[in-house]
Amino acid sequence: MGHTMTATAPRPAWHLRQQDPTLLDRLATRCGISKVAAAVLANRQLTDLDAVKHLLNPSLHQLRDPLLLPDMRAAVERIQQAIARAETILIHGDYDVDGVTGTTILVKALSFMGAKVRWHIPDRHKDGYAFGPHSLEKVRETGATLVVSVDSGTSAHEWIEKLSGMGVDVVVTDHHEPKEGPLPRCVAIVNAKRADSTYPFRELCGGGVAFKLAWALATAHSGGERASEQWRQLLMEFIGYAAIATVCDVVPMRDENRVIAHYGLQQLRKTDTPGMRALMAVCDLPEGRVSTTTIGFQIGPRINAAGRLANARIAVELFLATEAAEAQRLAAQVNVLNIQRKDLERVIADEAAKQAERWHDARHHPVLVLASETWDPGVVGIVAGRMVARTGRPAIVLGIKDGLAKGSARTVHSLDLMQVMKAGDGLYTTWGGHAMAAGCTLPAAHVDELRARLVARTRELLNGEAPPPRRLEADYELPLALYGDVLMNELERLEPWGQDFREPVFLTRDLRVADAPYIMGKDRKHFSLRFRSGDTVVKAKAFNMAERVQELTPGTPIHVLWKPDRNTFRGITANEMTIEDFAVGEAPLV
Ligand SMILES: [Mn+2]
């Protein structure tokens, strides 16, 4: 591992959230929950009694009528017409988890309706993002007269126009923010983020929108108000794919997204489709263990690895597989690609860390612009994220090929990436993104100039200071004696956790080491130990913190920020702590 003593991030500061005690009392009493759970909800802006009751009692009825989405009726009618006329329909997806799962949903739905359906996933390395010349090629090759997009198309004016020129109709399903000006002219643009949308929830992911279209098709195809029994089974399978997309596309875990994730997780735990079963098997996940965490860290990366290192088509083929043997072969393939992805990422991350040593002073160089001809653009986003975590500074990581630098940027919470990157205006060939993540391409010859400008701009934004330390938020100061099954059961009712609905973090002060820390993991980067407080002893695990283990001496009071974790091992379930951070002496509270 590239060791960068001088360039490591400063220790995080802690912040204990405080809520009005009368508000917590009222929420707890009226909803029949503990004050701890009430604090967790209040810290996530959930203080409305109806909203909390909804959250505690998820139901499929909380999903809204798909026909409320703009252009949904036109989309359904055009697809039905295509089926009646035996036209070929091309599902046009994307190479990330959202695009892959959404494509799977629509291919399965249209096949069930007896459509002549083909599908297309762009090649991340050859085709670039979403629509392009490859779309026209695929339409010619398949003879499709209707294209249904997934997770893209809202801004594909040029390509949609070219497709109409070829006599091809387009139905867009998407969740990306439309650019200013008119939308592309086509049959339908099903996107809750349209300016004229009256849909009450904007935050569905691409897989979620595809699920909505499948549902609308199911109702129409069943000829009435209610989908047939067969369709309902199919829709329950689809909600599993939509849940994977909802977690991996990091859309807010609120409103309909919670319902999709809740029912999707239930569905995935008992799935009998060959593809899903084979994928879970290579993730080493007994079905009951599927959670938002295992989706985010095990299932999602394997789907993405296909697109990053080879072609995301493999992942769609896996989900569409009808035979167990074929599914197992494809699952093994994505698993190997994921191992290669991790190796590649580690090599690039080490090289990037080494390069960053040149700019080790965070005050003089509060932003990192790193580039190399040997870095694969498929993983630079992940590496940028790791550089931010390692250095506490925004990072742009660029892979150079044929004189063109293509990169991804990530940042710390205190710095808006759009403000930083704007300083490079005029140097980029393309760029875009949002406050926390962005992408750009520029001639490799401009990289040094870009670095100089972004550094100057960021120094201005920070008044010459280094970026402030990361802030860790604690929901509640919890005496260890209160951590038990009652609280854990209650917290499990608030799941699934996700974007804008983060897992609870507790602060517990003055813990003692009950027995010596035990270093664990293949790379010996993790440790576990037991903490004691009075008569209570709880097992705790810390990941990637082994180098700090000697700070934990018996007899010294330790303050800990931690997440609750229920762990089952050899049939025994125990409540454990996952250490987020710890401090000896003073707690670094701000
Ligand atoms: Mn998406």
Image (spheres, helix red, strand yellow):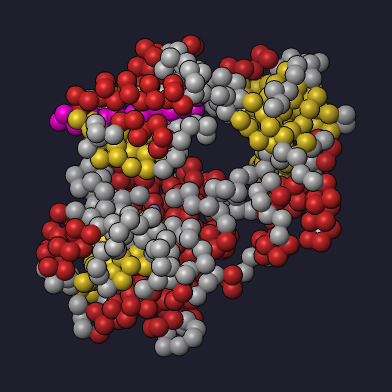
Q: Going 66% across and 51% down the picture, which residue do you hit?
A: 45
In this picture, residue 277 sits left or right of residue 77: right
In this picture, residue 303 sits left or right of residue 575: left
Q: Which residues are magenta?
A: 384-404
Q: Residue furthest bottom?
A: 223
Q: Is residue 299 above or below residue 173?
A: above
Q: Nearer the viewer, residue 120 or 182?
A: 182
Question: Residue 102's image quarter?
Answer: bottom left
Q: Going 39% across and 25% down the picture, which residue do you hit?
A: 457
Task: Give the x, y percent position of residue 440.
Answer: 29, 37
Q: Nearer the viewer, residue 584 or 463?
A: 463
Q: Going 71% across and 55% down the picture, which residue do you hit?
A: 47
Asked if residue 293 lies in the magenta stretch, the reply is: no
Q: Is residue 4 above or below residue 221?
A: above
Task: Give the x, y percent position of residue 406.
Answer: 26, 34
Task: Give the x, y percent position of residue 272.
Answer: 47, 63
In this picture, residue 82 sits left or right of residue 467: left
Q: Is residue 231 above or below residue 397?
A: below
Q: Is residue 173 visible?
A: yes
Q: Nearer the viewer, residue 582 or 111?
A: 582
Question: Residue 494's image quarter?
Answer: bottom right
Q: Going 36% across and 25% down the picture, which residue do you hit?
A: 454
Q: Is residue 320 above or below residue 579?
A: below
Q: Is residue 526 visible?
A: no
Task: Give the x, y percent position of residue 161.
Answer: 17, 64
Asked if residue 387 lies in the magenta stretch, the reply is: yes
Q: Check the picture and name the quadrant holding the C terminus.
A: top right
